[in-house]
Image (cartoon, rainbow, N blue to C red):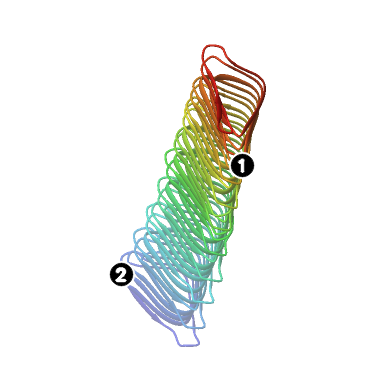
Amino acid sequence: GTTLTSTSTGLTNFGSATADGDATITAGTLTFADLASTGGSIAITAGDVTGTTLNAANAVTIGAASIDIATLTAGTTLTTTSSGTTLFGDATTGGNASVTADSLTFDTLTSTGGNIAIDVTNATTGATLTADGSVLIDSGTIDITTLTAGTTLTSTSTGLTNFGSATSGDDATITAGTLTFTDLASTGGSIAITAGDVTGTTLTAADAVTIGATSIDIATLTAGTTLATTTSGATILGAATSGGDASITAASLDFDTLASTTGSVTLAVTGATTGTTLTAGTAIAIDSGSLVLGLATAGTTLASTTSGATSITTATSVGAMTLAAGTTLDFDSLTSSAGGIQAAAGGALAGTTVDAATAVLLTADSVDIDTLTAGTTLASTSTGATRYGTATAGSTMTITTGGALDFLSLASGGNFQATVGTAMTGSQLTSGAGVAITTGSLDIATLDAATTLAIDSAGTAILGIATSGDSATITADSLDFGTLASGAAVFITVANATTGTTLDAATAITIDSGSLALDLASAGTTLATTTSGATRITTGTAGGTMTLAAGTTLDFGSLASGADILATAGTALTGTTLTAAGAAALDAATIDIATLDAGTTLVSTSSGATIFGSATSGGDATITADSLAFDTIGSAAGDIVITVAGDTTT
């Protein structure tokens, strides 16, 4: 039990000091080789303290201007003045350790049975810091190679906090001006970091990781993660893998791999978000000024601001996918294997493949997709153009665009409904059920399904080949087709000209058009043109009653009906061959038919002339005309009654 006192200028030097009780030393300068209190504490007050081994059964308290001890053992409290330096070679303590110094340097500082508390004005530098309990460091700058324990680190706003490797069995809390680390881990708890700049290689936590910094650059990040940077900051991640939810708020974000294997990923980025692979066990939500991703996997929600561009190389989702871009959305492949896809772009939406288990809803100024698969609803703004390479849907497909729609092949396993503001152009349109199209102008090479087409007064409807298993209804300003066929009826209403090669219907054909030019009409047929229109048919064959009405002229090559033929023309009715199983009734100002075959009733107006090349009928023939000229008129089985200019001959 020893009390040693030297003057302020004195030097107190021990080779070996052993005490069975408390030891108290006051000296100007203290130097020792081995200082031990085997049964009590050691308290030292000196200017400078230098020693090799300091060992106490109880607490060690040192107050000195500078402290340099190679090996320190016991619960330890060290205090230096504001100008002092505290230096340890190796410090091992069985209780709590408390160090207060102007600056602190150590090789190994360990508290095997308690906590370590360090309060250093300037720099704290060390190789290995280990505590069984918590480690609390408040220092201007901190540079520790290996840190082990539940850890709270604080550096000033200008400070640099640098770790080589930091491993903690409890929660880790770090506040620094700048934080740089190689390996920072909390194996049993969370990591919370507040710093200006955070740079590191590997950050691992058993629980959540929370980082608030001006800039963040981490190669590998593992844990449930929350990252926040200031508006001027950039967040860069090499690879981030998390077992919980990941939430990142940044001015800009760049990553190689960002993954939350069992939770969600939420990104709020003011500027650009750039990444190679983004994976989440549940939802991905991104709100960013601009977005460029290599791959996004999970139920995905992507949103960029009104100024942003969203580009996705490949996105595969097991849930519903929602994409929103302020300007353009560009992708290679979008897939939602268990849900729908909703994509909205302020400007253009361009992509190679869209595949969804349910509905696809796309909204953009312009849409350009090569292959589209799903029950699909497409909508673009009034200025937009929608273009597809190939679109195949297993259910009803609905397309609405304010601008134009251009496609190679569109197919629906159910209905197909399209409303197009300007022009609709396509090669192949196929539907399992009805097709309803409303557009300014229409040009389709091949149309297959029950079809309803409507275009506005300025439009032109052009069909190369249209085949339908149900009724076809077309309303257009003008209509031009190669082949138009229906397994049921065909209804056509055209303000101006209707032109076509082949028109075929299983039941009735009804046409109301300004003018009509057909190569062939098949079925029970009703054709009507306006008062200014001319109707021309090269060959018309119908299995039922045929009714023709033309405002001006009706001209045909061959007209045949399995029942009656009823034809009315405002001016002239001209034809080569007219054949009907029943009666033929013709009413026109002038009638000129080369061959007429059927029970026939012909009526022309008072100014008209009725001219036949050859007329043969199996029933009664009744002709009323202003004048009549013919080569041969025959009624093989009945009467012929002719009334010309009031005179009747039977």
Q: CA distance from mark 1 to mark 2?
A: 132 Å
Query: Who comes first in sequence, dot 1 or dot 2?
Result: 2
Picture coordinates of residue 319, whole percent (x, y): 42, 43
Q: Is residue 407 visible?
A: no
The one of 78 and 114 positioned closer to us in this rendering = 114
Q: Which mark is residue 274?
A: none
The one of 452 and 631 positioned closer to us in this rendering = 631
Residue 612, above or below 58: above
Between circles 1 and 2, the one closer to the viewer is 1
| Residue depicted at 59% across the width and 33% down the height | 645
The one of 528 and 22 positioned closer to us in this rendering = 528
Going by the numbered disc 2, the residue's amino acid type is: Gly
Crowd tier of the residue under label 1, counting other residues whose Cα lies within 10 Å: few below 14, some 14–19, many 20 or above = many
Picture coordinates of residue 246, whole percent (x, y): 44, 54
Furthest residue toward bottom: 8
Picture coordinates of residue 377, whole percent (x, y): 47, 45
Q: Left or right: 46 with respect to 494?
A: left
Q: Quadrant of the N terminus?
A: bottom left
The one of 629 and 340 positioned closer to us in this rendering = 629
Which residue is label 2 attached to?
Answer: 21
Crowd tier of the residue under label 2, counting other residues whose Cα lies within 10 Å: few below 14, some 14–19, many 20 or above = some
Badge count: 2
Going by the numbered disc 1, the residue's amino acid type is: Thr
Query: Could you tell me which secondary element the residue under label 2 belongs to?
Result: loop
Query: Could you tell me which secondary element the residue under label 1 belongs to?
Result: loop
Quarter-of-image position of residue 27: bottom left
Q: Is residue 22 visible?
A: yes
Which residue is label 1 attached to?
Answer: 552
Quarter-of-image position of residue 604: top right
